[in-house]
Amino acid sequence: MRLNFKFKNLFGTAYKSGSLSFTDNGLGLLSPVGNQITVFDLKKDEVASLDISSYHDIRHLALSPSFPILIAVNDVGDASLCSLSTGCVISVYPFKGVVMDVSFSPDGKFLAVAKGHNVMLFLAPCAKRQFNHLELYRTFYGFSDNVTCIDWSCDSRFFIAGSVDSTCRLFSVYNIPKIFVYTLSGHKNPIVGAFLFRNSVNVLTVSSDGMACLWECNTPFNELKSTNNSESGSLFKISNRYRYSNSADVQMTIPVSAVAFHKDLRLLATGFESGLLLLHTFPDFVIISEVNLFTNSINTVTINRNGDWIGAGSEMFGQIAVWEWRSQSCYMRADSHSKQMTSLAYSPDGLHLVTGGYDNKVKVWRIAGGRSIVTFSEHTAGVTGVAFPAQNSKIVLSASLDGTVRAHDLVRYRNFRTFTVPTRRIQFSSLAVDTRGSLVAAGGLDTFEAYVWSIKTGQLLATLTGHTAPISALAFNPDVSGIDIELATVSWDSTLRIWDVTGNSADENNLSSMGLTKEVVNFSCDALCVAYRSDGKQLAISLLNGNIVFYDPQEGVEMGTIDGHRDLGVSQTSENDLVTPQRAAEAKKFQSIAYSVDGEHLLAGGDSKYVCLYSIPDKMLLKRFEVTCNLSLEGVQEVHDRRKYLSHFSMETINSKEAQRPSLRIPSTVKGGEQSRRQWRPEVRVSAVGFSPTGDAFAATTTEGVLVYSLPSAGTGYGASSCFGVSSCSDSGWLFDTLGIDETITPSNARAALKQGKQAEALDMAIRLQINELVEEVMESIPIDQIDFLAHQLPVNQVTHFLISFLARQLGGRSRHIELYVHWTHSILRAHALNLRRIAANSALSDSVNSRESKSLLNKDSTEEEHKELNNPGFLTLRGEWATCQASLVRLQASLNHVKSHLIKHFEAVDNLWNYLENLSDLYRTKSTTKSQKQNITETCSP
């Protein structure tokens, strides 16, 4: 199994806080999610995460109009200069203070930064090589409070800034004495937005109390030139004052929270704390659109370049909406889990992922695009467990603290069955589904019992009693070779119980007699989670002390232990911890474990910022994946300053003195935090982990969202290069194979060969480079009558290493040319079926030899020759290559089945429409015949 897993995508959280920003082509929307940036591709309906992270939550984004460069500023004022063409952070510039706004000039030469009471003007990065990417050009003063907003003129000579002190100031970048600094005072509340009109110095200002002022300049725009002859007198005057309450049904008590202005169309988009979005035209101030996008405050508003879409975000529940005002419809809406996610599960085909959280919601995500396809909100309490049946990807089951287990249909998107305990209401803490998909089990949190239902009938079949503490986890044995159905449960009473669910069913009226305890295993501390290996011959149990115990359910013996509490890392959750980091690390434990598909590795996550990958035969840690480096979360920083623990140096006391507050804030009432603390930050943790059924990816639900890690061939999620108009390398570039690559193998040469009609040469170059966009361009340009010939000419290593995963990627929803890629798939598999079978047979033979030689090592009489043969690296490499290809074949099969089901639905819809039209025509003929008969009768009866 390859271990080069790399972060691929982040979903489950659409928006956290900060400003949204549209890309230059208007097809992408950038959203800050914690310390990362998510890009919503509005054209393809996909979500991609940039491989860019900061050490604190990102608040402000600014895209350069001249180069593919992004400036991301976090909470503490550190600006990350990012290249969108390479996806790398070029440099980090510390502003050493909280930044309220950042904006590029239209010509891309300057960058204005609002920091405290000042505006700092920097020379923006250019195409030339520079030692300092941001060079301070000038600092503008004059405000008595924090600056809130910045906007530039169209020629980049002026910019205006608004402040909390209710004033706006117009600054000139160059030496223009008449308008070097000009103050506009006319508001009574803080300024939310200030904007300059196109080809003019007229100013529009909006304050938080719902007042908008239009300032007109008495000097033409072209006459404001650099001169030393300054003229006295007033330069601006208020031409109009507008009240939002006069144009719409908006109460005066609702403050304005965010505004955006489109200079070409002169459209003003205003967001209110009630979730209302208004769109006005200027200078008439006529409302053309009014919609309630959210139930909470709108924190940011932005408009794309064409002015067709308005993006808005709300921090309360992490919601994003794109409003298309011309059609008066919501073009895109993305919701997040408003509270911590608790569980996840992969679908059997590996195309979907389901998550549940404490916000009472169950969300199903499309892994390829990262978007949620459906949200189930039937639960009235937190969801504690979700699961897919092993042989059915159209059903999702979820358990909740509201005392119900619900089965959801992914075809009709409805809750079709609810499982409850008839006698009493119970809070369920865990969930499991058997391999056949006929039984579902849930563990009780307050009754210390497990319950088993029939999915087909919904009847409660068995109540498993024996535990003396809440049941923390349960799992069905995936081995279906036998008749009995085995269920394993672990509890806080430090025991593992293995049940035979079908072992004692003589008395069907007495539910407590159904289900027999086969074995009870005692541990030294509480058991937290349990997982079966895919063959059902091994159990893994996570304990409260951080250990992971492996147990053989057939032989009843312990197979080894992993001491994992040291692998969780050393960190203190907060500044209030009065213990050393080493002592705090002793209380950490794993909350979730999952076996790999081959059963040789174990994935574990818990009270830490790490996800650990272990080798089961060696009982050792192979790799640790750091889920976040965000210091805005608790538990990330490993060492704190001990002086902060003293009352004299307490940060709360210092902040209180600086703000001149007479007392500290009241204790926090945030759910999940300590009630006696005055400040609350979420703590980083991993609540659930799971491997993909294909074995080439895994996912983890964390405080930041759902993190997906995959191998290069997985194809889960796609890059955001189309949103920025730049091309990026393929995902397989992590292990780029340079064999057969020389200076002539370039994308430009491949396109040139394609134009010259050399399709075979162009396809060979594109596959060698492993650039998905280039291969897509070449394949779609090849005539359909040449596909069979080219498929036979392809080497088998190109088919197994790249083409199968690429075709699975295209048919999984990436391309609209379904027929073309189905033809390619058919031709390639028909041409190379014999070679693929031969590779599979060699892999199976190597697997059997590996098993036989591993057993010989356990024999003390094994010779040195056998040891030397085992060190031969031949079949291990072949097995790893074939395992990756096999995972791609499984994903390709799932994509083809998905296409097949869509075609069947389409033909059924066409057939129903045809029958409907036939019925209409028959009805029309019947009416016409009846009418003609009535006319004949009337003519006959008339004299």
Image (cartoon, rainbow, N blue to C red):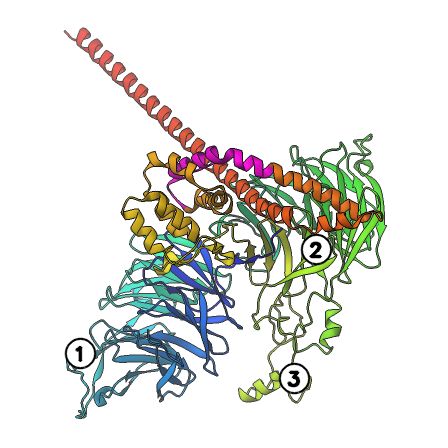
Say which residue label 1 marks: 221
Which residue appears farthest toward the front when viewing the image? 865
Q: Is disc 2 placed on a helix, strand or loop?
A: strand
Q: Is disc 1 placed on a helix, strand or loop?
A: helix
Q: Is disc 3 placed on a helix, strand or loop?
A: helix
> Start and end of the magenta stretch?
815-840
Q: Is residue 820 magenta?
A: yes
Q: How many C-alpha atoms fall within 10 Å of the one at disc 1: few (<14), some, or many (≥20)? A: few
Image position of 931 with respect to 820: above or below: above
Q: How many C-alpha atoms fall within 10 Å of the one at disc 2: few (<14), some, or many (≥20)? A: some
Task: Look at the image and tell me in which quarter the C terminus lies.
Answer: top left
Q: Of discs 3 and 2, which sits in the foreground? A: 2
User: In the rendering, which numbered label is found on residue 644?
Assistant: 3
Locate residue 662: give its quadrant: bottom right
Q: Residue 68 placed where, x, y %?
A: 36, 67
Q: Residue 493 placed where, x, y %?
A: 82, 55
Image position of 187 with respect to 789: above or below: below
Q: Amino acid at mark 3?
A: Lys
Q: Is residue 619 magenta?
A: no
For marks 3 and 2, the one nearer the N-term is: 2
For marks 2 and 1, the one nearer the N-term is: 1
Q: Amino acid at mark 1?
A: Phe
User: In the rendering, which numbered label is found on residue 615?
Assistant: 2
The majority secondary structure of the magenta stretch comes to: helix
* Inter-mark Cα distance, 3 to 2: 40 Å
